[in-house]
Image (tube, helix red, strand yellow):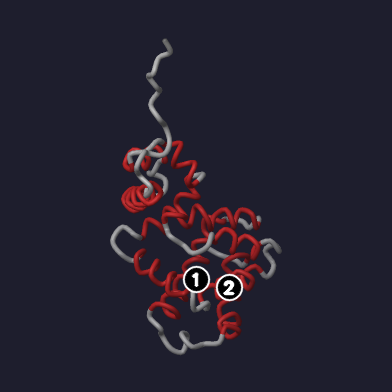
Amino acid sequence: MPSTSRAPRRGRRPGAPDTRTTILDAARSAFAEKGFAGTTIRAVASTAGVDAALVHHYFGTKDDLFLAAMELPFDPRHVIGPAMAGGPVGAGERLLRAFLSLWDDPEIAPVLVGIVRSALQPGGERLLTQGFVPVVLLPVGEALGIDRPDLRMPLVISQVAGLILTRYVIGLEPIASMPAETVVATYAPVIQHYLTGDVP
């Protein structure tokens, strides 16, 4: 008589339609507490009570899981990558224009502001320093072929972060109401210098 026993099921937990949300909650906590480098897919899966294969099924790599945990309304790699495709010359302006196209969008901007405010909470800084910078920014600098991307890309984000806070979060005038072209003319040369100019 054939055995009716079955091997333990792997993958989605029965009766748990919110498994994806559970995984994301576990991932957010892990990234905030341990940073990107200290977080593993296996640990996130254990906290969520699922198999690690299911985390890969929903989110792919750890990089993809991190970006999903940030709840961005877009994949920044798909925005920054094409802007950098033209090489180092003019990259500062292209990057800034891509950035402004998102932050000046009235449908996307409120979501982005909420994410920034969350990142300013205790522990949130790790999402930037140990996640966003190594996952998104450093690969961009390496793809551009610039020297010392580990120095130059944090300099770039320091300028962009300052612009985000003053223009979109705090609303500091005249920066908050400055036309996009004026923002580009003002900030793009500084960003370009960080990318290709002389740095200490």
Give how far across and how far down residue 114 sits, in percent: 38, 70
Q: For the residue marked with disc 2, what is the amino acid?
A: Leu
Classify 91 as above or below 40: below
Residue drawn at (42%, 40%), measured in percent from left and top? 41
Task: Return the residue nearer the eye: 49 or 128.
Answer: 49
Picture coordinates of residue 95 (x, y %)? 60, 69
Asked if the residue at tag 2 contacts the one at tag 1, i.e. Cβ–Cβ closer than 8 Å, the answer is yes
Residue on which the image places disc 2: 96
Which element is circle 1 on? Answer: helix
Q: Is residue 35 visible?
A: no
In depth, the one of 177 and 159 nearer the eye is 177
Q: Residue at x 46, y 85 (%)?
A: 176
Which residue has dot 1 on it?
160
Q: Give the alpha-carbon distance from disc 1 to disc 2, as whole Å.
A: 8 Å
Task: Tell me the residue at 43%/78% (across/down).
Answer: 168
Q: Where in the figure is residue 146, as x and y percent of width and height? A: 63, 58
Residue 149: percent from left, percent from top? 56, 56
At a point 60% along the width and 82% down the height, the residue shown is 185
Near-viewer residue (84 or 31): 31
Q: Residue furthest left?
A: 122
